[in-house]
Every structure is written in structure tokens, then in C-alpha cells.
Image: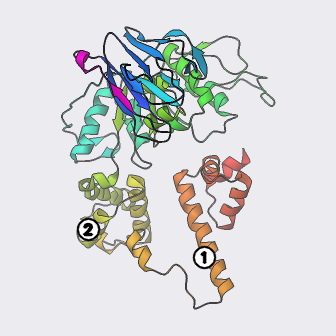
Amino acid sequence: MLHRVTNAIERTSSGLQTRVRIVYAGGAEPVEVPLPPVGVVLGADAACDVHIDDVAVSRKHVSIVPRASGFEVTDLQSRNGTWIDGVSITNAVVPVGTSLRLGSTIVQLLPAEEPLSLEPSARTQFGSMFGRSVAMRTVFAMLERAAQSNAPVLLLGESGTGKELAARAVHEQGARAKGPFVVFDCGAASDTLIESELFGHKRGAFTGTVADKPGAFALAHNGTLFLDEIGDLPLNLQPKLLRLLERGEVTPLGGRKSETYDVRIVAATHRDLWNDVGRGTFRGDLYYRLAVVEVHLPPLRKRAEDIAELVRHFVAHNSGRADTVAGPTLDRLVAYQWPGNVRELRNVIARAVALAPPKARFDEMPVMLRPSAKQAAEEPLVRADVPYHDAKAALIERFEREYMKDLMRRADGNISQASRIAGIERKYLYKVLERNSLLSGRAKEDMEE
């Protein structure tokens, strides 16, 4: 279905405070238009302030007016209705970040663009994070300010960029440093247990519960709760998390009254959470509640000037001595693309130190990197110097092992998350990992639970 958006509100666009974002079905690029103080009417009629070319949208479908507490949304007797989280509305005042569904089109209600310009920090280290690059010192400047407040922080970045290190540093350099720092992996817990583990449960809440169990929020009381991979939190639990963030109250499973906790939230994800909001898999209002301070951690390939310092740190950490980091080996490391980011660099150096002769210099260490795509393309995938069935079996075995190694790296060793990524049953995954000697201690614990 073809969608297009035009608008006729430029004439009143001075002093705009808010925006609407139109997300089309079929993967077309979203379009943002300003929302003036008088509001706009959205519909299929070309005379509307915002024209939406969607056969399921009425000629004059809905009006949106900015208010002090959010947006007033009024359905204009449309034939297919205006929907919020599966509920049809007639008139309501909704918060920033709410997503409306009009036919097959999503309309997101956004705050004003408020560009923030920060001078890069003079520091080259923040907590356990290192970096002299402008990209990292800009991140440090944001984290320094965030640490001095209680505002929620949302850390975005690829796997291995140091999101947990950033969260821990914000905690340790803030007013809650003496309180607990609790890590909760939203992608690791099973859907059936995640609510209990996050919010806690009372004795007898479900079969096998013989005692009360505090949830992650209770454990983090007066401290910081790090919600890792928040993008994997099931949609049905997101309203409950939002209520807790807004009120500081939660009712444990099986409980009759709510309990209050004083918790600072730092969340992180490798996902494009904004696009998830557009697709309806993550609530817009929860996104804006978490992203009061939003920090993007750059991938290592975007800050290659930091690699030498990171290598020196990792060599010293693993060998117990300082060493000169230079020469062809360092050139190889700088030229490499680092799909696993700083975590991969740390592991590469740890392996090189472990396999090096005693007292070996850095340039004598066996630094092993994955072959580049070009190198891999130049090597034959299969060879015909062995019988057909032997070659086929060897290829399948190689595929299985390499697939499982990368799968468990992406899932950070968690069986449940790996099972979801691969789309296979946990028991079968366990057998394949066991067959390839890839079972980590964490994976074994996951299967025993």
C-alpha cells in the first residue's frame, strides 16, 4: 500500500513545541511534521493539515492538540476508529510518546526537538571505560552530568560497546554509590518468570513458591537498577514497568498491596528501540520515560584511535606488566572492523597473552583475528580432495560449530536467549552445544533451572 504525507502547517510553524511522526505500513520511511499550538487534523482528505494516503483512514479522521500534560486526541467519528494499545478512543489526553493507530498507519506523538551541544569531557576515563577519541569524551560528558541526577538513562549501542560498564560508572559516581547496583537482563529470563524476577512474588503466588521472593526492584532499593536489553521486555509487562517508574510502586505477584521502592533506572539495549516503537513492539510512553537521558555508545570501528590505549590496558591487565604497543600487530588491530566491539578486543588480547611465551613482547604475541570477508571469499568453502559424503559431513560439522559459537556470543552465553534467536528448542540447542563442547557454565545453569 502506498502512503504519502503532505502538510499545510508551515504557515503556523513558529514557536512549535511538539511533533507528530507518521510511520507507514510496508516499511516506507517515516515522516515527521511539526505540531502547532492550535493542533492539526489528520485524514485522507487533501484539505487536512496532515494528509495520510491510507484507504483505511477517514477523510477527517482525528484531531491532535498539544496540551500542558501531553496531547488531546479526538476521533472525528472515523469509520475505523482511533486506537491506542488496542483500545478504541473517542477523546483522551495522552502523554508524550503515545502511538496512535489509524487504519494501517501509526502516528507517534513526540516532544520538541531540543538539540544538546556538550563539549567533550577532559577525561579519558569514566569508570572502567577508556577513550581519548572525541566520540568517547562526548559520551563521558553526558554520563558525568547524568551521574549527578536521578533521571533515568537509556544506553544504546551494539553488543560489546560497554553499556553495563557505563551503567555501573553512572551509579558509582552518583549520589547512590553506597547503595546496591542490581543488573537485570530482560532478555535472559523466561517469559513466564520474568514478572516474578522483576517485581517479586509472595508465598503461594504459583506452584512451588514456598517463600516470599524480592524482585529486582526490591533488591535495588536506594540504589540503581540496570535493565539490560530492555528492548526484549515482553509487551504485556511494559505497562506495569511504566506504572512503577511513574509511581515508584509495584504489587508483587500474589500480593494484595503495592510496595514502594526508591530506585534509579538505567536501561540499555542493542536494538533500534525507536523503530520498535514505530512497529508497535515497544511502548512509546515507556520509551520516553526511560530515555530522559539517551546516550549512544559508538562502536569500536568508529573510534579506532582508542584501540592502542585499550590494547595497552588489556595487555597490562592480563600479563601484569606494561608493554609497548606498536608495529604491524597494532596496525592489524586498527584495520580490523571489530564486529564484537570492545568485548571482542578484550578477548583477543586475553587469548594472545595466554598463548604467548613467557615474557613475550606485544609484537611477539599470537594475535588471532577472524578472517575478513574478502579473505573468506578467496578460500574455497569445500574441497574435492576427499570423498563426497566425508566432505559434506565435515562442512555440516563446521557450519554447526561456527553457527553455535556465534549464536552463544550474540546471546552472551544465555540458553534461553540463544534459543529465541535461533528459533529452536532449548533441549535441542543444549544437545548441539554439548556435541560441540561449547557449553558454558552459565548455559549449564540455565538448563538446570
For residue 113, which quarter of the picture?
top left
Number of numbered tags placed on the structure image: 2
Residue 331: image tag? 2
Place of residue 254 in the rendered image (x, y in percent of width and height, measured from the top left): 73, 19
Please give left or right for residue 142 compared with residue 278 in the image: left
Place of residue 174 in the rendered image (x, y in percent of width and height, measured from the top left): 35, 26
Q: Label 1, on which residue?
A: 395
Residue 375: image tag? none
Q: Is residue 232 above or below residue 244?
A: below
| Real-space Cα separation, disc 2 to disc 1, in angstroms | 33 Å
**Residue 177 appears in the rendering:** no
Question: Which residue is at the front of the view, 274 or 159?
Answer: 274
The residue mark sitting in front, 2 or 1, is 1
**Residue 138 appears in the rendering:** yes
For residue 232, which quarter of the picture?
top right
Q: Badge 2: how crowded within 10 Å, few (<14), some, or many (20+)?
A: few
Place of residue 117 in the rendered image (x, y in percent of width and height, measured from the top left): 21, 31
Q: Residue at x 57, y 26 (%)?
A: 238
As helix, strand or loop, the secondary structure at mark 2 comes to helix
Q: Badge 1: how crowded within 10 Å, few (<14), some, or many (20+)?
A: some
Question: Which residue is at the front of the view, 312 or 420?
Answer: 420
Query: Hey, which residue is sitting farthest right in the picture?
Result: 207
Identify residue type, mark 2: Asp
Work out whether mark 2 precedes mark 1 in sequence or the reverse, and give the earlier one. 2
Q: Quadrant of the C terminus?
A: top right
Place of residue 255 in the rendered image (x, y in percent of width and height, measured from the top left): 70, 16
The magenta stretch spans residue 39 = no
As helix, strand or loop, the secondary structure at mark 1 comes to helix
Span colored in magenta = 1-14
Q: Is residue 398 above or below residue 288?
A: below
Identify residue type, mark 1: Leu
